[in-house]
Amino acid sequence: MHSDIKKQFNVEAHYNTPLRLGQVDFINCLPINFPIELGEVKINTKLINDVPRKLNELILKCDIDIAPISSLTYIENKDKLVPIGDLCISSNGPADSVLLFSHFPIEELHGAKIALSPASATSNKLLEILLKEFLKIDASYKIEAFHETLLESKDYSACLFIGDHALLEFSKKPRDLFIYDLGSLWKKHTGLPMTFGVWVVRKEALTNFPKEVETIIAKLKESKEIGLGKLFDKVIKKAQEKVLISTEFYNTYFHHLSYEFTNECKKGLSIFENYCNNLNPNLLKTNR
């Protein structure tokens, strides 16, 4: 760590802490992000909003210090990153926004070409594990930028959408497609929750700023409680501004998700890590 920490971190003068906090710019993180955005929870740090893939890159380049990142990125960088506050994004069954849209039943995807999401390596790897390890299906994969006509393309037999893109496609109620929830499939085959992302801090930042990290953790937990509590109706309305689906759907959606990194979630993540290690790491080259 350089002696002039402010220069190293390029921190603006009005921030009293050098720590920078990443936030996933997806609906699934609104219960934690929105109270901070509204000012209900005051958090004295610089905020950077982006998709998981970008936050993964930023924290590995030391451009942010704390963030929710893809589980796969955490698994591959345990020497640099520490989970914090028992915070995660997981589902013990349906995730509702990690969806495979297929023109064929999933059992018929052997040899098929599947479009993957550029937003998160974890969901891409999860799909490969589900198909190859559990369903004994070998397919070919390609990262494909999201566009609203992707499902109409004849280039792919199926497309994996995550986050807001998955919710957007689901909201169109496509009747001619088979839709598979990867959280449900993981639960079916392992009996465990699927942890898609975890909040982590860089070890170096934790060593140098333990009190500041502790304060940010407390604020994130406070925000989560408020977002799932007294501001829950506003969280749903904010979600509907992004992707218009019924209040009933979002009420179920947010309760399907868990933000608690429980022992069961940790066990599920450990199983996921084992399957990742069993696969050829070169099969899916993605930006993490």
Image (spheres, rainbow, N blue to C red):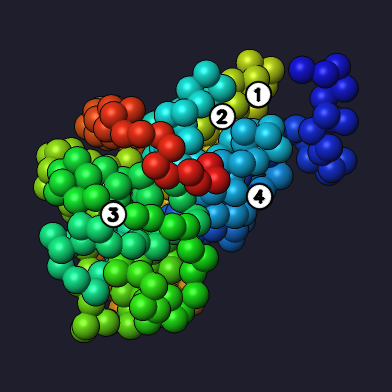
Find numbered disc 3 in the image and state the secondary structure of the residue it sits on.
loop
Marking on residue 205: 1
Find numbered disc 4 in the image and state the secondary structure of the residue it sits on.
strand
Q: On the image, numbered disc 3 is attached to which residue?
A: 139
Find numbered disc 1 in the image and state the secondary structure of the residue it sits on.
helix
Q: On the image, numbered disc 4 is attached to which residue?
A: 48
Find numbered disc 2 in the image and state the secondary structure of the residue it sits on.
strand
Q: Amino acid at mark 3?
A: Ala
- Residue 146 position in % (x across, y down): 49, 69
Q: Is residue 127 visible?
A: yes
Q: CA distance from mark 3 to mark 2?
A: 35 Å
- Which quarter of the picture shows residue 55? top right
Q: CA distance from mark 3 to mark 4?
A: 36 Å
Crowd tier of the residue under label 3, counting other residues whose Cα lies within 10 Å: few below 14, some 14–19, many 20 or above: some
Nearest the eye: 151 or 192: 151
Q: Amino acid at mark 1?
A: Ala
Mark 3 or mark 4, whichever is nearer to me? 3
Crowd tier of the residue under label 2, counting other residues whose Cα lies within 10 Å: few below 14, some 14–19, many 20 or above: many
Mark 1 or mark 3, whichever is nearer to me? 3
Label whose residue precedes the other's in the sequence (3 or 4): 4
Crowd tier of the residue under label 1, counting other residues whose Cα lies within 10 Å: few below 14, some 14–19, many 20 or above: many
Image side of residue 132 versus residue 116, left or right? left
- The residue that appears at 25% across and 70% down in the rendered structure is 102
- Residue 113 position in % (x across, y down): 33, 62
